[in-house]
Image: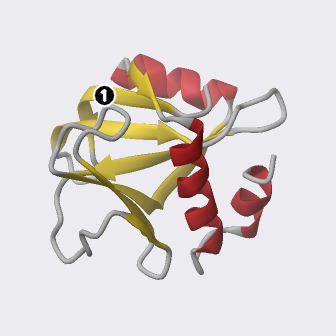
Amino acid sequence: MKGDILWCKDFRFPDGTIVPKFFVVLNEPKPDIPRLIAMTTSQQHEKLDREGCHSAKGYYVFNRGVDFFDTEKTWVLFDTVREYRTTEFEKFEKLYNPERKAALKEQNLQAIINCFRNWKDALPYYRNLLKE
């Protein structure tokens, strides 16, 4: 459901690396509307760490303790947003067995969505799906 924080214990990256990974569901899926899901990370690397929207950089940052996130910082990464139609999400569920850990407060989810919609590389199709 919209705003869910999903946890996959053994998420496999294309390079074969397997790690536990959190995801955020950005919209409410419907039969004709796919789920948009963003990956999160707690690894800063070259990213800014000030909480809030960094649409020019392509992410949103939460501090520890916001809506379940328990790492010092959590980045919601816009370049990881993927769409999952019902059958694709069923495959995702079979492969990763995601657990719903919590849900974002509406204001925090809306902040992510607004930030994503201002990201220069956001696909127009995704922007339109997030208008609802």
Asked whether, in this view, residue 125 is left or right of residue 50, the answer is right
Q: Of 4 and 109, which appears nearest the observer?
A: 109
User: Which picture quadrant has residue 114?
Assistant: bottom right
How many numbered discs, if any?
1
Q: Which residue is drawn at 46% across and 21% down?
A: 93
Secondary structure of residue under mark 1: strand
Q: Residue at x 40, y 28 (%)?
A: 6
In this figure, which residue is indicated by the disc labeled 1? 8
Residue 114, above or below 66: below
Asked whether, in this view, residue 3 is left or right of residue 31, the answer is left
Q: Residue at x 51, y 46 (%)?
A: 108
- Mark 1 is surrounded, within 10 Å at the Cα level, by few (under 14), some (14 to 19) or many (20 or more) other residues, namely some
Residue 17, above or below 5: below
Residue 90, above or below 66: above
Q: Which residue is drawn at 67% across and 68% down?
A: 123
**Relative image position of residue 77 (x, y in whole percent):** 40, 59
User: Which picture quadrant has residue 57?
Assistant: bottom left
Q: Could you tell me which quadrant the N terminus lies in?
A: top right
Q: Of 86 and 68, which appears nearest the observer?
A: 68
Asked whether, in this view, residue 37 is left or right of residue 59, the answer is right
**Relative image position of residue 17 (x, y in whole percent):** 16, 46
Q: Of 69 and 30, which appears nearest the observer?
A: 69
Given the image, on which type of amino acid does mark 1 rest? Cys
**Relative image position of residue 11 (x, y in whole percent):** 27, 35
Q: Of 87 and 73, which appears nearest the observer?
A: 73
**Relative image position of residue 8 (x, y in whole percent):** 30, 28
Residue 23, above or below 96: below
Coloring scheme of the render?
A: secondary structure
